[in-house]
């Protein structure tokens, strides 16, 4: 750790020119206070686009202490992010991901520097040295990657600066032996070549104590990531090329899961496990982006990417140290598995994704603007699950489950905006998508008798898009109404003999207002919307031990209201975001129940149970509130002291189609953070912070029973505190 900190310090001190963090990313903000977004493939004032969106620049991320992707839900309305073992469930307005099936696709698209991150296994490792974040709410059915039903999150790293040398260093230390270091170096080698290098190390002890005999401490953190961006441009600035590379490596003792019925301790931050557990993830991403500006200001944009990642993990099968494995000599039958649940399993995932996109973008200074393009993705995911019924720590498996998934997505799209008068703009967009998936499944032992091998194929096509009208009542007031359709592709289930699942579709009508008031000191944006979400892809299980799969439920409908305000007056600044949702199933359906509670109904056959009309939709809390207040006290011309308090509230929500208090409810929570920033000058500042000031104990995620490990509660972080140094040179 000391060697890494010394290296980071040398990188930062080697640079010579101070660059404000927010100014390093052209997608964040401009000198007149305008907030710029790039999600529509061109730089646009956030107040001029008919999308409910939250934009955070590097300065905002620093002020709020947002250092992880999961932390975005503390500062962005309608956003819910839950860590579910190796997967990360991201939902916006209750739409996104609610199942861990490796053959599915997320309803919320995550981008890094214009490149879609397909697998939710590998979306948290890139959150460092971030220049801006754009959180788009509602279906993005025209321009977004493989399409999305819930929204999109665009992450952008700071662009290299030509002709200057600069750097930054961020060091954080806190309780639970938490240490984080982020360093960046900008090498402006000439007017045509610039390089930005950034690296991050993050480590922390677990919040949870393992009382069992295992030497593992689930819940700890140990991750390294590095990124390089090489920027090239022609002398006339008409051709710009970026070559980007990123590497990440994380090794920890896996996630800390509290047994719901822990017989040893009722303390949420104490577990009792006897198995050795770990999670090992590493991978890399490469991308090339080229932008060519024609003489008529039309732009050709081409981007290609290769992503490669792997995960190897194992955990305690019964989440306790009280259950015994099957004695030697007894067969691993279902009866013996139930009688002796002390098992362990190991998972392997290998993923490789190829992506390509081409856009032709019209000039921005015309009454008619447009973007046309094409997208291609080829994704391969190989998964091996091996279960050991004779040992609590994995030694050798008796049940081997092997699957290989090849997914291909192609689409063409176009979007336009046309000012029919000085105040009225018509917008429209269409996208046609083709999606194919081939799943090769091999249940070699323990899952079926006799062993099974098979190949399943699914295909789906869809038209999606958006139509709307923007009315610019003045330079500071814009009203809009839009209708949009989002689409998430169907797929195959990895369980032998189980049918696949159909695509889901989300239709949304939204009426919004964007206002800039009080000489640009106040931004007040609001939206009301209605969503008709059909064929929801929900988590289900089948067999024993229960195997996870995905089934389609009936439709759900949502009414919602969002209000977001940002105020800056002198040294005072504040923000508040409030979302109210009424989201529930509007059609009944029968699916395999993934939790051990009876929802049987005469209308459902076999093991299927009834998802009733009126059941709440997963990950759709009635209320989410984000608020922050700060005041900058000037101590001198350069020095200031800024206290800040921020609050995040989520009302109760469910994680499964079947609502139960014990197995699928995330109770309401309110988390308050406080920090005090001492800015010594424009380049150096020191923070003291306390997160979860009131030490709120809350369940952050609910895990269901799977083949290799039982489910349970994942508790959110208790009170943490520390100091952070930020230096820019």
Image (tube, rainbow, N blue to C red):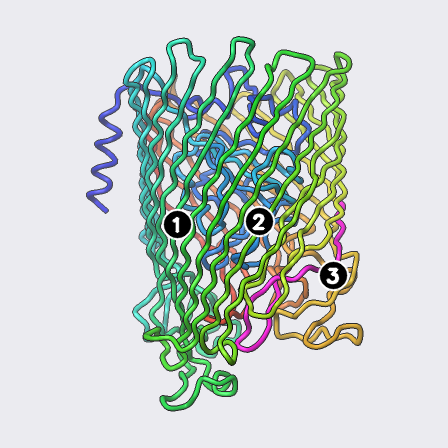
Which element carries disc 1, helix, strand or loop?
strand
Q: Which residue is mark 3?
A: 615
65 falls in the magenta region: no
Q: Residue at x 33, y 13 (%)?
A: 191
Q: Can residue 62 be seen in the rendering of this structure? A: yes
Mark 2 in CB contact with mark 1 (< 8 angstroms):
no
Prevailing secondary structure of the magenta residues: strand
Question: Residue beneath label 2, please?
Answer: 106
Q: Are marks 1 and 3 in contact (CB under 8 Å)?
A: no
Q: x, y percentage for residue 94?
A: 65, 49
The disc, 3 or 2, on the residue closer to the chain's N-terminal end is 2
Q: Residue furthest bottom?
A: 329
Q: Residue at x 68, y 66 (%)?
A: 658
Query: Residue 480, labelled with which disc?
Result: none
Identify the residue at image location x=65%, y=74%: 597
Q: Where residue 93 sits in the image (x, y, percent)?
A: 66, 46
């Amino acid at each position: 750790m000391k060697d890494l900190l010394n290296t980071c310090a040398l990188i930062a001190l080697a640079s010579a020119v101070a660059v404000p963090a927010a100014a390093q990313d052209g997608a964040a903000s401009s000198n007149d206070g305008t907030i710029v977004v790039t999600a529509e493939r061109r730089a646009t004032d956030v107040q001029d686009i008919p999308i409910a969106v939250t934009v955070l620049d590097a300065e905002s991320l620093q002020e709020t202490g947002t250092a992880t992707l999961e932390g975005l839900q503390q500062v962005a309305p309608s956003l819910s992010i839950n860590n579910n073992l190796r997967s990360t469930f991201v939902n916006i307005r209750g739409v996104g991901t609610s199942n861990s099936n490796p053959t599915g696709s997320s309803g919320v698209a995550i981008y890094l520097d214009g490149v879609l991150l397909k697998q939710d296994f590998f979306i948290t490792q890139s959150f460092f040295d971030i220049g801006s974040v754009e959180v788009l709410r509602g279906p993005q059915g025209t321009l977004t990657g493989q399409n999305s039903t819930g929204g999109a999150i665009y992450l952008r790293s700071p662009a290299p600066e030509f002709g200057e040398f600069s750097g930054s260093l961020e060091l954080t230390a806190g309780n639970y032996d938490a240490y984080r270091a982020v360093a960046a170096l900008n090498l402006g080698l000439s007017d045509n070549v610039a390089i930005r290098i950034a690296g991050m190390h993050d480590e922390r002890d677990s919040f949870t104590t393992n009382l069992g005999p295992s030497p593992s401490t689930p819940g700890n953190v140990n991750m390294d990531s590095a990124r390089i961006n090489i920027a090239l441009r022609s002398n006339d600035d008409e051709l710009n090329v970026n070559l980007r590379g990123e590497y990440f490596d994380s090794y920890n003792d896996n996630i800390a899961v509290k047994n719901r019925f822990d017989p040893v301790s009722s303390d949420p931050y104490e577990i009792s496990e006897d198995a050795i557990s770990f999670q090992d993830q590493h991978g890399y991403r490469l991308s090339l982006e080229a932008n060519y500006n024609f003489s008529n200001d039309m732009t050709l944009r081409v981007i290609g990417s290769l992503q490669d990642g792997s995960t190897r993990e194992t955990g305690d099968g019964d989440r306790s140290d009280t259950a015994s494995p099957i004695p030697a000599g007894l067969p691993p039958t279902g009866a013996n598995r139930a009688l002796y649940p002390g098992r362990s399993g190991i998972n392997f995932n290998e993923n490789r994704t190829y992506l390509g996109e081409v856009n032709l973008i019209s000039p921005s200074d015309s009454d008619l603007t447009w973007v046309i393009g094409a997208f291609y993705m080829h994704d391969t995911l190989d998964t091996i699950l091996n279960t050991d019924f004779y040992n609590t720590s994995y030694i050798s498996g008796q049940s081997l489950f092997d699957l290989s998934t090849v997914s291909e997505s192609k689409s063409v799209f176009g979007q336009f905006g046309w000012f029919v008068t000085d105040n009225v703009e018509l917008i429209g967009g269409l996208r046609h998508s083709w999606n194919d998936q081939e799943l090769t499944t091999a249940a070699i032992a323990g899952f079926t008798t006799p062993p099974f091998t098979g190949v399943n194929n699914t295909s789906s096509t869809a038209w999606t898009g958006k139509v709307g009208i923007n009315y610019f009542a003045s330079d500071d007031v814009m009203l809009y109404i839009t209708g949009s359709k989002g689409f998430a592709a169907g797929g195959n289930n990895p369980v032998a003999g189980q049918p696949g699942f159909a695509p889901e579709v989300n239709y949304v009508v939204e009426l919004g207002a964007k206002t800039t008031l009080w000489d640009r000191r106040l931004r007040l944006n609001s939206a009301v919307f209605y969503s008709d979400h059909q064929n929801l892809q929900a988590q289900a299980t089948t067999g024993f031990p229960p195997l996870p799969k995905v089934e389609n439920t009936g439709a759900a409908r949502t009414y919602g209201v969002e209000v977001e305000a940002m105020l800056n007056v002198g040294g005072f600044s504040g923000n508040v975001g409030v979302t109210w949702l009424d989201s529930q199933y509007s059609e009944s359906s029968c699916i395999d129940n993934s939790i051990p509670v009876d929802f049987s109904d005469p209308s459902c056959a076999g093991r299927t149970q009834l998802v009733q009309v009126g059941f709440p939709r997963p990950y759709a809390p009635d209320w989410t509130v984000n608020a922050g207040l700060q005041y900058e006290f000037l101590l001198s011309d350069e020095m200031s002291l800024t206290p800040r308090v921020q609050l995040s509230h989520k009302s109760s929500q469910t994680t499964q189609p079947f609502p139960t208090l014990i197995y699928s409810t995330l109770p309401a929570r309110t988390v308050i953070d406080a920090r005090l920033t001492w800015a010594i000058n424009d380049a150096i500042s020191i923070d003291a912070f306390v997160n979860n000031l009131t030490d709120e104990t809350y369940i952050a995620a609910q895990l269901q029973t799977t083949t290799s490990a039982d489910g349970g509660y994942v508790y959110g972080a208790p009170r943490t505190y520390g100091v952070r140094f930020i230096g820019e040179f």
